[in-house]
């Protein structure tokens, strides 16, 4: 597997566990209902030079992007939780070895665990970034090189 592919799913356990701990710890303190929203994004992209290579070695490609997502939020008197997660799947028509999956997360939560004395704030994110800013890069994520995932929590 190429080093430019997304990290293995096992690498995401820490931010996911941190989010679950925050959800569980704030549940009794939150008085309102959960707000759940799901989404599905579909896109088809054609590139006459998918690798951004010199014109004599350019490769054309159709890329299908399927991105399901979920947004969860809850606000209460002593805490709040907001999370937005998307699973971006890129499917290449001519070269299935390039098929990729990228996790994208933006989550934050806060809780007042002991009234007026003990507070908990947490944030977690998963996104993609350019590995080498000096190399060519497309504005979108369908170019199959020069990017990797970064996790923060």
Image: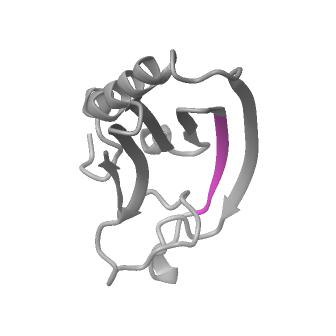
**Percent from the top left, x then y, of residue 63?**
64, 49
**Percent from the top left, x then y, of residue 21?**
36, 22
Reply above or below: 138 against 64: below
Residue 15 seen in this snapshot: yes
Residue 101 seen in this snapshot: no
Residues shaded magenta: 60-68
Q: Which of 138 and 106 is in front in this view?
A: 106
**Percent from the top left, x then y, of residue 133?**
34, 79
Q: Quadrant of residue 15?
A: top left
Q: Which of 115 and 104 is in front in this view?
A: 115
Which residue is painted at 40% across and 20% down in the image? 25
Which residue is painted at 39% across and 63% down in the image? 129
Q: In which quarter of the image is the C terminus?
A: top left
Q: In which quarter of the image is the N terminus?
A: top left
Which residue is painted at 65% across and 38% down in the image? 67
Q: In which quarter of the image is residue 88?
A: top right
């Amino acid at each position: 597997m190429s080093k430019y592919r997304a990290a293995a799913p096992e690498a995401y356990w820490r931010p996911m566990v941190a989010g679950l701990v925050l959800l569980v710890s704030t549940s009794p303190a939150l008085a309102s209902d959960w707000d759940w929203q799901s989404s599905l994004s579909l896109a088809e992209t054609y590139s006459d030079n998918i690798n951004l290579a010199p014109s004599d070695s350019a490769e054309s490609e159709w890329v299908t992007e399927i991105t399901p997502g979920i947004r969860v939020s809850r606000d209460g008197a002593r805490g709040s939780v907001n999370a937005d997660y998307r699973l971006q799947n890129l499917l290449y028509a001519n070269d299935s070895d390039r098929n990729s999956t990228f996790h994208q997360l933006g989550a934050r939560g806060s809780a007042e665990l002991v009234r007026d004395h003990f507070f908990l704030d947490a944030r977690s994110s998963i996104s993609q970034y350019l590995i080498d800013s000096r190399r060519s890069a497309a504005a979108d994520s369908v170019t199959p090189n020069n990017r990797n995932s970064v996790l923060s929590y």
